[in-house]
Each structure stands twice: as structure tokens, then as C-alpha cells.
Image: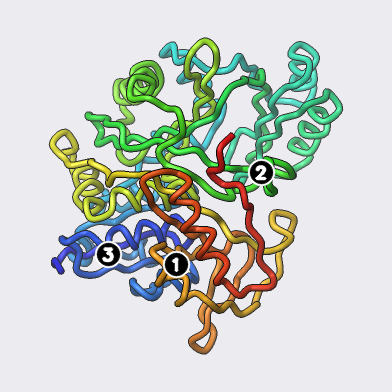
Amino acid sequence: MGDKRVLIVGSGGREHAIGIALAASPEVGSIAFAGGENAGLSAIATSLPADAAETADPADYDLVVVGPEAPLVDGLADRLRAKGLTVFGPSAAAAQLEGSKAFTKRVAERYGIPTARAVICETRDEAMAAIADFGAPVVVKADGLAAGKGVTVAETVDEATAAVTSAFEGAFGSAGHRVVIEEKLTGPEVSLFALCDGETIRPLATARDYKRAYDGDLGPNTGGMGAVSPAPGVSDALVEEAMATIARPAIDGLRAEGAPYNGVLYAGLMLTADGPKLIEFNVRFGDPEAQVILNKLGPRTYSALYATATGTLADADLSLSDGVCVGVVAAAQNYPAGSAKGEPMSGLDAMAAMDVSVMHAGTRSVDGAVHANGGRVLAVVGRGPTAEAARQKVYSALNALDWPGGRWRNDIAAPD
């Protein structure tokens, strides 16, 4: 065990994944987290009040890792750096890549990044005119952060109209005061993750996540019901094409504009007949993508994140463990419509002994027992030489979970 002290901002499944990977890093001696309850994360890290990052001193931590997007958009990384802390996470200016869909569209236009044709609309009338121009299917996006619920892929004009009306009537608060209307791209969707230290940008991993609630990609969109890494069918050549045409131009452009990017850049891509095109940028590890990617980065996590935060990424070891990693989310029965809280869960110890990693998202500890705390509750992650071997580990472990109020998809990483 090393002597490095790390503070993680956030308390969800992504942050538990970060914590597990940091705990496996030989440099790390202690971990704390700030932002809420998480029974799994509490087992490996000290739980601190939600405002602990704001009051942190440079003498307290060798590295601060900001997990969620909202504090990044709000400028937390800037405030911590101004106090002398070493931070993994972009500035508020750079975080606008996720904080504003309109901002990203303008960046794409300035730097020739291939993306869907789009119109930025300040009023409902402008949005309706854009829908009339595009026809259906069409994509309606609330401009700001909307907790993963601000994007509607509308198959009909009526559905698009309803999405626009909902946004401008306040369904997403200030995030919906502007919308982006864009053409619907077709092709396989993949996620590309890269690390950026303000100057250097290097690819880290690809993943495919499964957004729909039910088997067969049916039901409403969710925050993600599972993931596999690497993304099936994505070659090294395709990754380099996406880096050259999408990720690097965006990062180089932001740096030229005085907003150098530090942290992980998550590019959502559509692999169209004309090559990869940008769907959206996110400025943090995805959830559940973090669970599978960081499982493969493992003991190299601290050195990789620290190098990113300190401008020394060019020489960092970003090698990933061999094989395929599959993660399956166990969620409350009614998720994403709503979910019961407070149900006890058992079988977790048996699962942990089955060559899988169990990462908590919506859990809390009650008198020493783990209780579900709503939404996406667990992610169970397995690694194997093939996707099928990895998924078999995960589903065997899920059979040991005793949680009547939970459910999960049974087709994550199954052959198409």
C-alpha cells in the first residue's frame, strides 16, 4: 500500500468503480468520497459531507477526482485548482462540451467535426419550424444538463412536438430553455473514452452501453442497463479515425480558445456509412461504462489519472488488461419511471466470491445490512477471454442475488 491520498467527488456507481480501481493502485494509501450514501463505496473509502471538496486543503489530498458532470459544469475543478489542489476534471469552460448541446454543435461547426445536421432553437416556434424542415424521425435535445433525460429520439412529428413543448414548459428547468433539433443518424452507436491533460490526448477504451430498459432494446431510455468493453467490432483504425476527426479537433480547438481540457473526454459516436460522427460529448466517465473500463485499467488507474491532472500524460501507462469486460445493472422494478427504496438485499457476499466485481450505485447501509436506495442499484462486472465468457460470469452471479424488488436485462453483450 502506498501513501497517496485521494478524494472522489460523487457517490454513484461510477464513483464506486473509480474507488475500486484506485484501491487496486499500489500508490494509493487512503480514499475518501463526498456526495452521498453508497454502501459499497463506504466499505473502501471514508464518507465525508457533500461539501468536503469545497473545503479541502492542498495538504489533505494528492489528487481529487470529480466524478459527476454537474459539479464540473458548475466550476468545481476551477475552484479547487485555484486553491492549489491537483484535480482530475475539466474547467467550467471546457465542461460546456457536456453542459450545453448548443455549445458542442458550435464547436463541431468551427472545427469541421462530423456530426448530425442541427438547428439551435431559442423558442418553441423556432423548434417547430426546424421539425417541419427535418420531418421525422428527428432528435430533440434539451440544451443543458437534464440527468440523462433530455434527449428524445422522436419517430413521429407528434412525438417531436410533445418533446419540444415539454422542454419549453419547464420539464428540465433551465436546461430546456433552449433546444437543439437534429437529424437522426443511423448505424451502430459506440462510446470512445480518451484522457486529456490540457495538451496531450490519448485514447483509453471503447465501450457499448445498453440504454433501453428491457430486453431486445425495448422500453424507455435509461441511464444505462449494462455495458461491454471493448465495443464489439470497433477496430484500432476506426478509433484512430475518430480521434483524428472528432476528439483531437475538439480538444485542440478548445485549447486554442483558452480552455484547455483536463480529464476524461467521452465521445458518443454513431458509426454511419460515411464514417464515425459525433452524437455528443460528455466530460466524465460514463455510468455504467466506467465500471467495465476501469475494471480493465485496474492498478494503473491512479498513475493514469494523476498524469492527466499534472500534464504528464504523454508517458503514462494506459495499457488495459486482456479480455472483454461485461457489466449488467440491477435496477429497481419500476426504473426509470420510479422505484421503491429501503428493501434489504442479500447474496452480495456470495456474488463477490464468484470472480465478479459488484459495484454499488443506489445502496445504503442500515444497521450493517445493505438496502436498495432506488434507481440503478448495482452493477455486476465480469471479465473473460470473450464477451460470452464474461457475461456468463455476470449472470451466474446475479442468480445469487436475493432482491425481490430488483430486475435486470438478460441480453447485455449477447450476440446481435
Q: Amino acid at mark 3?
A: Ala
User: Which residue is label 3 attached to?
Assistant: 23
**Distance between mark 1 and mark 2 Cα atoms:** 31 Å
| Label 1 packing within 10 angstroms: few (<14), some (14-19), many (20+) | some
User: Which residue is label 2 attached to?
Assistant: 212
Answer with the quarter of the image where residue 343 lies: bottom right
Left or right of 201 on screen, residue 389: right
**How many marks are shown on the rendered structure?**
3
In depth, the one of 291 and 196 nearer the eye is 291
**Distance between mark 3 and mark 1 Cα atoms:** 21 Å
Residues at circles 1 and 2 in contact by the CB criterion of under 8 Å: no
* Residue 213 drawn above or below residue 404: above
Q: Amino acid at mark 1?
A: Ala
Q: Which residue is found at the position 71% from the left and 30% from the top?
A: 153
User: Which residue is label 1 attached to?
Assistant: 50
Residue 327, percent across and down?
48, 52
Residue 328, percent across and down?
53, 54
Which SS class for mark 2?
strand
Left or right of 20 on screen, residue 413: right
Answer with the quarter of the image where residue 93 lies: top left
Q: Which residue is found at the position 37% from the left and 25% from the top?
A: 235
Q: Amino acid at mark 2?
A: Arg
In depth, the one of 162 and 94 nearer the eye is 162
Q: Quadrant of the N terminus?
A: bottom left
Q: Quadrant of the C terminus?
A: top right
Q: Which residue is found at the position 19% from the left and 69% from the top?
A: 29
Q: Which residue is found at the position 38% from the left and 16% from the top?
A: 245
Task: Give the mark nearer the N terminus: 3 vs 2.
Answer: 3
Is residue 385 visible in the rendered image? The answer is: yes
Residue 332, percent across and down?
67, 64
Left or right of 124 on screen, residue 284: left
Residues at circles 3 and 2 in contact by the CB criterion of under 8 Å: no
